[in-house]
Amino acid sequence: MTGAFDFAPAIALLPLAAFVVALFGGKFLPKRGALAGSTALAGSLVLSIWTLVTVAGGETYNADLYTFVAGQDTLTLHLGILIDPLSALMLVIVSLIALLVFIFSLGYMNDEGETGLPRYYAELGLFSFSMLAFVLADNLLMAFMFFELVGLCSYLLIGFWFREEGPPSAAKKAFLVTRFGDYFFLVGTVGIFATFGTGMFAGPESFPHMAEQALAGETSVTTFFGLGEQAWFTVLGLLVLGGVIGKSAQFPLHTWLPDAMEGPTPVSALIHAATMVAAGVYLVARMYGFYLLSPTALGVIALVGGFTALFAASMALVKQELKQVLAYSTISQYGYMMLALGGGGYVAAVFHLTTHAIFKALLFLGAGAVIIAMHHNENMWDMGGLKDKMPVTYYAFLSGSLALAGIFPFAGFWSKDEVLYETLIHGLGGNPLLLAGYAMGLLAVVFTGFYTFRMVFLTFHGEPRTETAEDPHGVRWNVKLPLAVLGILAAVAGVINLAPVEKVTGVHLTFLHDWLDKAPDSFGTAVHHYTGDHGLMHEFAGYTATNPLGETGTVLAGAAVSLGLALLGAGLAYRLYAVPDPEEHTDRLGSLKTLLMNNYYQDEYQVWLARDVTLPLSRAADTFDQSVIDGVVNATSSVSLFASERVRRIQSGIVTHYATLLTLGLVVILVVLGLYGGWF
Amino acid sequence: MSNPWIAIGALALVGVLIPLGMMSVSALLRPSVPEDSKRASYESGEVPTGNTRIRFNIQYYMVALLFVVFDIETVLIFPWTVIYGDAVDAVGLGPALLPMVAFIGILAVGLAWAWRNGAVRWIRSPRAQQELTE
Amino acid sequence: MAAIELPTWAALAPALILAATALVLFLIDSIESEPDTTSPVLLTAVGLAGALGALAFNVWYLIADTGQNAPIELFGGQLMVDGMTLVLGTIVASVLALVVLASYDYIADDPYQAEYFSLLFLAATGMTLLGSVDSFVTAFLALELSSLPSYALVAYLKDNQGSVEAGLKYFLIGALSSAIFAYGISLIYGATGSLQFDAVAAAVDPTALPGILGVGIVMVAGGVAFKTAIVPFHFWAPEAYEGAPTPISAFLSSASKAAGFILAFRIFTTAFPIEAVATTIDWLVLFQALAVVTMVLGNFAAATQESVKRMLAYSSIGHAGYVLIALAALTPTANADLVLGAGMLHLLVYGFMNTGAFLFVGLAEYWDVGRTFEDYNGLAQEAPIASVAMTIFLFSLAGLPVGAGFLSKYVLFGAAVGAGLWWLAAVGAIASALSLFYYARVVKALWIEEPSQDFEIDTYPVGLYAAIIVAAVVTVLLLPGFGLVSEDAIAAAGALL
């Protein structure tokens, strides 16, 4: 019987086919490969939805596809597929957004007459393939491989306009910074393989399960450096977290993401909002069972997340370019997800991941439409009054902004509220670290409301401030269609998990929770296994929930506070910027503005680290390498060349010499062996 | 038990010593009469023309090779014919006959090829050809 | 069990098909209307059919487990068919098919093509038979059957001084080695009174006549060392490989070497098992020493060559050293199946990658590119596909994981370490590292260097290209498919012990 799961590899392979087609045949195709890509992604989307439906029917899948190293009694390395509710959901999100981005690219790239389109679509296809394969991965090694491939595609796409000055250096930066994190990830992966002998995510043979049993004292595993089991698991978790922090642009490795906006805007939408950045968070969610075993790791995740949320939001306050604002808001929103994961809100994190993917892709595509209209000028101070010229874009963008700011009843409100709520109750349950994260998250809500609406008002409201804004370039259906689809989704996607409403009214509305809980017990990835009454969170992380005002009261109070703060921020923005001729109020911030504009001198200190600390070190290493190592190597090779010359001389070309040498050789062998064997 | 290699060594020693001894004895005994005619190739008086390194026509080897092949064939066929009658009684006609047929068949293929490629044609001498046409 | 019951002699079908093909080619040459007018297409087609037929039988028998549970004995125990026979048959037939395909273009303008092909098939018959010999008589006959046509093939380019000289040298050294081999056989007969392998093993008496037996064993080892180009019997190899028509170099360095090794495996595991003869002659020590010397000498000499073909010739000596590890590591503590199986696997993989590399050189000769590394500069721009294939071959030969050469070397060295001979594996690894240096020189010339000449490439020969690409594809495919073949090879080795 063939079912959806038999076609699961095709979800990832279709975009790979599109990559090949676009790469080799893109030049000859109409639309330079866009149609091939769109068709492939449409196919992936259909298959993903089919998979989703199948999973909804209660089936899951966890199988090896191909083993490339089969060890005897040691580890085996293989490619495999794990489809549980989490990955099925993620597949739909990724393939949906990728499809829309392909369509949008028709308007953004083809209609604008860009060159190098086959390369563009090929890279986009390769990216989709890697991301989908990453989502499907059933073990850590495969995840790592595609994690890297995703990073490579991101590098290629950011540097798409490689002839200009900015993009190549941004691409390099993105590559290097994420690679820095990936080193930790790699070490962590090796550590996990060394410890458990497997990198499987789910099932009785998986490393989270083995770690759990080890902590429960049922089995034992090898630990290193004399650490206890829990301490060692914490080290492993934090190492993997290094990769996550790099890829999901968390503090302090977030600096690459704003620069990555040098790439084409559809790429920003796809990679730097909805998918690649999500890879990090997805990875934490994927091996959540492992993180739950270590309260320390969870605390670090929560603190990093909360801090990043606040920190990035503060920088977004003063940015002048549309995409820069969005970039910092992306960092900030991923901070929320990390906060949720660290705070025990698994469902909340996945929920926010879903809604964020939708509304951030929407905002980026909307920004793309505005950028087309503005002839590729991204400065918000040169815009204004676009509301009447491009109504579809405006309303879609507004929908996305309301979601981003977390205004009731848009999708972002529900998810962000749940993130904060989960963190709060677990923080109150005796975990001050989480409360600190919660406070930062709450403060970031104000900032979010402010910068979001500052952006909306500056771009769309008031009077046009330049001639381009007076007469914007029109956009076609292929831009409007994705915007409309996403705009509607951004408004209503919250219904998948209306937790507060459920708690207040008692009507069962937490569909996402149910959905994620569908994973079979054997996988150990279901929600009740993580955060249920006897789940890992209570057993190992020691989290307990406390509702000081009763459950309903706390829910309502939390929601009211976050909504109030969001409205406060939005209102402030309204007062300052929703006027026909807004001014730059940022000057009033004085030196704080300089600090914010310079991103807290993050780049500077990292450059300082690279230049003044690492460079001398590498010089020293280089000197060592050149003098000692190369010396040895050179000596070896001159010895070998000399020896080789000797050997060559034996081969004189005279056959009688050969016969003599041969016979002599035989005689020598006979004599030696004869003496040795005692024949005489 | 004495080492059997001693006997072999003694044999080798004798083998080397006898010729050496004879040569040295004759060198000591013989009178020395240097004479030019002793250096001639043929003491019969025949004067050699050219040196010994002349080329034989390849045809010579071809014919020799074919002769050897058929010689060996005969060596194989002869005992076969002797026991053929008994062999047929023992194992039947096929197993007794077919291997030899196959063997002769293979030889026949080789002969046919050699024949076709001129192995048994009489020597063609380019020089003689040239003289004929003149 | 096979679905069809074949008579027992049908187990020799691969060798019989090759012999029959040789005869058919002679026949075709005999009945043509004018000498040397048969169309090359017909000859190639017949040759390809024969080679593929033999390959098909080998693979079928391997899959059907013919003779793998219990060896099939033929002709009163003179010949036998078991797993190792079939592995060798597969190697020989595969290489033969590639060589036939490539020869179509390579010898397109030369006379005596029918003879060329038919000698090729006679040699292949001998090599295939070397896998199924079960007595010293048949071993000697098969060895000669594979050697004699080889001498002629090396000298096939009659007007090329290098080719004729190489043929003569090969013949002279070959004659000397045959004499040594034959003398060794006679000594063994003297010591044991038997020629059949099992009977020899049973009759070995370390106390009586130890010297005669020991000298005989060393001389037999010398005979196979000649066939496999192991130091000090390697002198013919660089000359013969360099002078011979390149497809023949490929054939000799891959198939002929494999046949020699399989014969060595057979003789030294069946006729002289180490436990029986260890007190007389510890051939493990002999082979360990020869393996080290061969690996070191082959790779060092390859590093200083100017001509690509000669470099490959020396590298093939180096590879003989690697395979010799399979015999050298048969220590009592070793996992013997794995050790021998690893040797066979390396031979199989080597058959494809080395043949491919030589055929690329043949392609370059076809285009008159030149012989040295410099002449290859920038060739990748003109022939990217073939250059990709060549890159795969070379990196696979060096043991990088682009082709199956990585795995086979890895298993081989791993088996040596498992046998407690870590130092042997270390020498092998160092030699491999050195080999990367000279293989990379070719790759660098192909891809990175600027062309030093104007290539005049107007045709892309179909046969050569096809052979190169097939070899490359198989080299790469064996990487994921390694598990499939390794099972058979290790089982075949297990049956031997």
Image (cartoon, grey):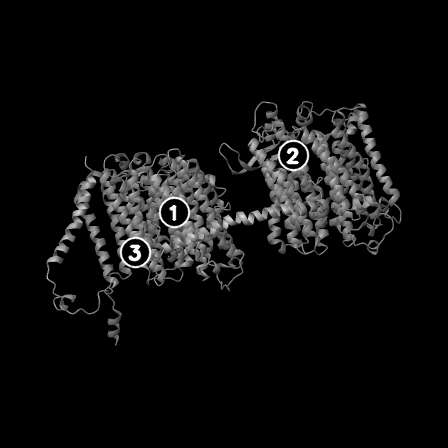
Could you say whether the residue bearing mark 2 is in a helix, strand or loop? helix
For image coordinates 38% across by 46% down, the residue present is C293
Which element carries disc 1, helix, strand or loop? helix
Picture coordinates of residue C285, whole percent (x, y): 35, 40
The residue that mark 3 highlights is A656
Quarter of the image where one finds residue B22: bottom left
Q: Would you name the residue on which mark 1 appears? A: C294
Sequence-first disc among 3 and 2: 2
User: Is A395 or A481 nearer to us in this picture?
Assistant: A395
Q: How dense is the environment of label 2, judged by Cα within 10 Å: few (below 14), some, or many (20 and up)?
A: many
Asked whether the residues under marks 2 and 1 belong to the same chain, the reply is no
Query: Where is residue A631 shown, x and y percent of the image?
Result: 51, 49
Q: Is residue B111 left or right of residue A22?
A: left
1 and 3 marks on the same chain = no
Q: Residue placed at 12% from the left, 63% from the top?
A: B32
C124 vs C162, nearest the viewer:
C162
Q: Amino acid at mark 2?
A: Leu
Q: CA distance from mark 3 to mark 2?
A: 70 Å
Q: Are dots 3 and 2 on a single chain? A: yes
Instruction: Estimate how packed mark 1 is, as few (under 14), some (14 to 19) or many (20 or more) residues with alpha carbons within 10 Å.
Output: many
**What amino acid is at disc 3?**
Thr
Which residue occupies the foreground of this view, A604 or C61? A604
Q: Provide the chain ID for the residue under circle 3.
A: A
Spatial CA distance of label 1 from label 3 is: 21 Å
Q: Can I make out residue C98 in this image?
A: no
**Residue A361 position within the rendered picture, expressed as x and y whole percent measured from the top left:** 73, 43
* Residue occupied by mark 2: A238
Contact flag, marks 1 and 3 (Cβ < 8 Å): no
* Type of amino acid at the residue the image marks with label 1: Thr
Viewer-closest of C38 and C207: C207
- Image quadrant holding the N terminus of chain C, namely top left
Q: Is residue C297 visible?
A: yes
